[in-house]
C-alpha cells in the first residue's frame, strides 16, 4: 500500500500533496457511486434495526441475558454505522471542496482523531460482543441451573469484559502513536500504527473464526442434549427449556457465522488485492478498498438476522408449545386409562 511507509513522523508531515493515483481515485465516478451505495446500506441498517429492536423488546423469545447482549450488539452496530456515515459525509464534502487541489484533497491525520477513534473502537467492540454471545450460549449449556437464575448478571459481566478488552486492544494499537501524515479518508488508521493495526485485524479474524467454531460446537451439543431429553425426560418444563436453548443457540450461531463470512470476504479480498497490487494502479487499489469494507455489510446483517431469527423462533416456539400441550394431554389420558384398567 503506497501510502504506508517506514518514514518518520517528521518526514510524513512533509508529504502534503497526494500521489496522482490517490488524487484520481478520490475524484473517480466509482468513488461517488460508492458513497451512494454505502449511504443506502447504512440507512437500511437504521430502519431494519428499529424493526429488530421492536421485535426483541415486544416479542422476546430469548433469555434475559441473551436479549440484553443482542440489544447491545445491535446498538454497537448502529453506532459503528453512524460514525461511518459521518466519516463518509465528511469525505464527500472534502472531495467536492478540494477536487482540483492534490495538496488539500487528503485529510491531515489529526483531523480524524475523534471519528476514527470511535469507528475503530466500535469495530473491535463488535468482535468482543460476538465473543460475549458465544460465551452466553456456553454458560447456558454447561451451567444451565445457575444461568437460568443469573442470565442478566452474566450478560452484564460479559459486556463489561468486552469493553475492558476493547479498551486494552485500542490502547495497544493506537496509544502513543503519532498521527503524523495525511490519509485519504478518516477510516484509514494513522500511518505509523499500520503494523499493529494489521496484527489486530488478523487476530480479530481468528477470534471470530474461533467464536464461529465454538458456537457451532455448542449448537451441536445442545441438539444432542435436546434429543436425549426428548427420549428420557417427560417433564414439560425441562423439555421446553432444552428446546429454547437450541433455538437461541441457532439464532446466535447465525449471527456469528455471518460476521465471520463478511470478515473473511473483506480479509481475503484485501489479501488478493495486495497480492495483485504490483500489477494494479494505485487509483484502482484505493477504489477497491472502499468496496470491500466487511464491517458495513456485517453491521447490516445483524438487524436482518435478529429480526428474521426472532420471528422464526416465535413461530417454532408456538408450534412446540402446541405440540407439548397436546402431547401432555395424550400422556395424561393414557395414564388415566392404565389406572382404570389396573383397578378393574
Image (cartoon, rainbow, N blue to C red):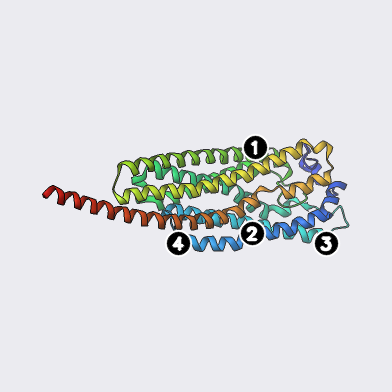
Numbered disc 1: secondary structure? helix
Q: Residues within 10 Å of mark 4 (few under 14, many from 20)?
A: few
- Residue at the spot of label 2: 82
Q: Which mark is residue 97?
A: 3
Mark 2 vs 4, N-terminal side = 4
Q: Residue furthest left?
A: 344
Check whether the beta carbons of the residues at disc 4 and disc 3 lie within 8 A of each other. no
- Element on which disc 2 rests: helix
Evaluate whether residue 161 shows in this view: no
Left or right side of 264 for 20: right
> In which quarter of the view is residue 115 placed?
bottom right
**Residue 218 rendering spot, x and y as whole percentages:** 45, 40
Is residue 227 visible to the viewer in this orientation of the structure? yes
- Contact between marks 1 and 3 (CB within 8 A): the answer is no
Q: Which residue is painted at 48% across and 52% down in the image?
A: 69
Q: Position of residue 195 (x, y in %)?
A: 69, 37
User: Depth-wise, is mark 3 or mark 2 nearer the camera?
Assistant: 2
Residue closer to the observer: 243 or 3: 243
Q: CA distance from mark 4 to mark 3?
A: 48 Å
Q: Disc 1 designates what residue? A: 199
- Marks 3/2: CA–CA distance: 23 Å
Mark 1 vs 3, N-terminal side: 3
- Foreground mark, 4 or 3? 4
Q: Earlier in the sequence, mark 3 or mark 2?
A: 2
Residue drawn at point x = 59 percent, y = 46 percent: 259
Q: What residue is shown at x 56% (from left), y 56% (from top)?
A: 303
Residue picked out by circle 4: 59
Mark closer to the chain start, 1 or 4: 4
Q: What's the distance in space between the residues labelled 1 and 4, CA to CA?
A: 41 Å
Amino acid at each position: 500500500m503506497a501510502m504506508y511507509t517506514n518514514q518518520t513522523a517528521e518526514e510524513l508531515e512533509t508529504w502534503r500533496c497526494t500521489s496522482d493515483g490517490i488524487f484520481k481515485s478520490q475524484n473517480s465516478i466509482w468513488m461517488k457511486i460508492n458513497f451512494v451505495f454505502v449511504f443506502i446500506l447504512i440507512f437500511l441498517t437504521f430502519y431494519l434495526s428499529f424493526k429488530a429492536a421492536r421485535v426483541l423488546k415486544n416479542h422476546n423469545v430469548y433469555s434475559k441475558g441473551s436479549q440484553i447482549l443482542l440489544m447491545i450488539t445491535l446498538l454497537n452496530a448502529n453506532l459503528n454505522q453512524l460514525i461511518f456515515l459521518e466519516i463518509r459525509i465528511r469525505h464527500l464534502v472534502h472531495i467536492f471542496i478540494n477536487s482540483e487541489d492534490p495538496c488539500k484533497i487528503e485529510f491531515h491525520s489529526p483531523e480524524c482523531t475523534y471519528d476514527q477513534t470511535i469507528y475503530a473502537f466500535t469495530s473491535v467492540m463488535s468482535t468482543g460482543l460476538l465473543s460475549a454471545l458465544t460465551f452466553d450460549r456456553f454458560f447456558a449449556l454447561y451451567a444451565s441451573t445457575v444461568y437460568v437464575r443469573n442470565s442478566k448478571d452474566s450478560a452484564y459481566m460479559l459486556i463489561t469484559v468486552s469493553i475492558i478488552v476493547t479498551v486494552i486492544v485500542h490502547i495497544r494499537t493506537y496509544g502513543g502513536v503519532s498521527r503524523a501524515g495525511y490519509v485519504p479518508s478518516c477510516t484509514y488508521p494513522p500511518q505509523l500504527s499500520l503494523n499493529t493495526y494489521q496484527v489486530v485485524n488478523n487476530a480479530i479474524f481468528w477470534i471470530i473464526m474461533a467464536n464461529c467454531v465454538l458456537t457451532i460446537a455448542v449448537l451441536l451439543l445442545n441438539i444432542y442434549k435436546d434429543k436425549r431429553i426428548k427420549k428420557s425426560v417427560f417433564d414439560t418444563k425441562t423439555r421446553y427449556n432444552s428446546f429454547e436453548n437450541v433455538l437461541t443457540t441457532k439464532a446466535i450461531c447465525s449471527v456469528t457465522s455471518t460476521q465471520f463470512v463478511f470478515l473473511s470476504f473483506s480479509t481475503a479480498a484485501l489479501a488478493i488485492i495486495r497480492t495483485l497490487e504490483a500489477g494494479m494502479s494505485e487509483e484502482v487499489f484505493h477504489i477497491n478498498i472502499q468496496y470491500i469494507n466487511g464491517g458495513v455489510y456485517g453491521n447490516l446483517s445483524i438487524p436482518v438476522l435478529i429480526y428474521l431469527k426472532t420471528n422464526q423462533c416465535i413461530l417454532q416456539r408456538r408450534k412446540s408449545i402446541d405440540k407439548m400441550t397436546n402431547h401432555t394431554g395424550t400422556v395424561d389420558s393414557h395414564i388415566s386409562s392404565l389406572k382404570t384398567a389396573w383397578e378393574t
